[in-house]
Amino acid sequence: MLKTFLFTITILLTFSGCSNINKAKVLLPPTWIGMKKISTKVYVNQDMNITQQKKLLKLIPEAKRYVSDVWGKVTSKPTIYACSTKECAKSLGIGARAYQFNNHLVLSPKAITKELIAHEYSHAELYKRAGGFFGWKRIPSWFDEGLAVFVSHEPRHDERAWKKIVDNNISYPSLNELVTLKQWNEATHKYNENINKNDIVVTYAVAGHEVEKWYKEVGEKGLKELIDKVKNGTSFEVAYRKR
């Protein structure tokens, strides 16, 4: 456990800088970071009340159904850390609303919704089916995020957001601007700089629109075939074109 934690910190320092070290905390035993177990693989901060806990436990299976609607069934079994306070979220390195890290889903207070839990669960499912880190790294950010948008039906991201972009002639990035995580983050800042993120998030809407169109062509079978090919060494670009 400690060796894994130290190795992860080294990777984060190399590629992401010191600000993301808090994310590696989720690899430590939950009690070391002030989290308590409320169900199998579900942990919350000590201050989360019973009503909030019950809400979270109700939403998780509902979110998983969104994932199974797209994949057929859920194969991933991530550990979920949920925060009910800003202090907890900050201590676990949550910069926006939530993130998926390795086999962990980490949720801020604003992310305790069916849609956003489903979004992060989608990341975990893709990570698992791609064979882990090295398979996942061969998948462009726009596909990973676009699939999560399609799975989750989050209104700030899905076709409702895309319609607002088109109707209001809002500038948006090409997919070539959204390949790496660095590109994704830069484009999210650039294209949403003068837009209310509580209304739409441009990069997510662009990626979700592309993946939804694609999925409606190929379906569950095509999705599984694509990820299997990538997992077995075919480049994503080649596998995606041959649909």
Image: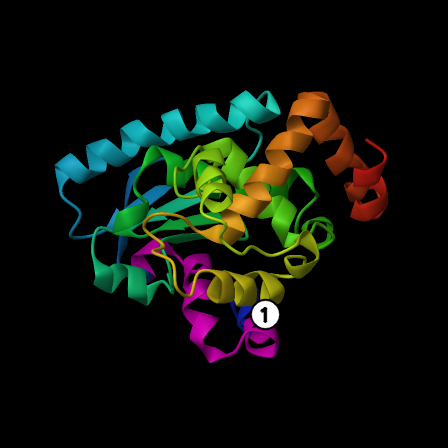
Left or right: 54 as drawn, with respect to 72: left
Left or right: 201 as drawn, with respect to 222: left
Left or right: 173 as drawn, with respect to 88: right
How many numbered marks appear?
A: 1
> Looking at numbered disc 1 in the image, what kind of residue is underneath it?
Phe
17, above or below 187, in the image: below
Residue 77 seen anywhere in this rendered image of the structure: no
Mark 1 = which residue? 7
Query: Helix or strand or loop: what does disc 1 sit on?
Result: helix
Q: Position of residue 200 (x, y in %)?
A: 40, 48
Residue at horizontal 28 percent and vertical 48 percent from the top? 110
Q: Nearer the viewer, residue 17 or 43?
A: 17
Q: Where is residue 65 in the image (x, y as percent from the top left)?
A: 45, 23
Q: Is the magenta stretch mostly helix, strand or loop?
A: helix
The magenta segment: 10-32
Q: Does the magenta stretch include residue 27?
A: yes
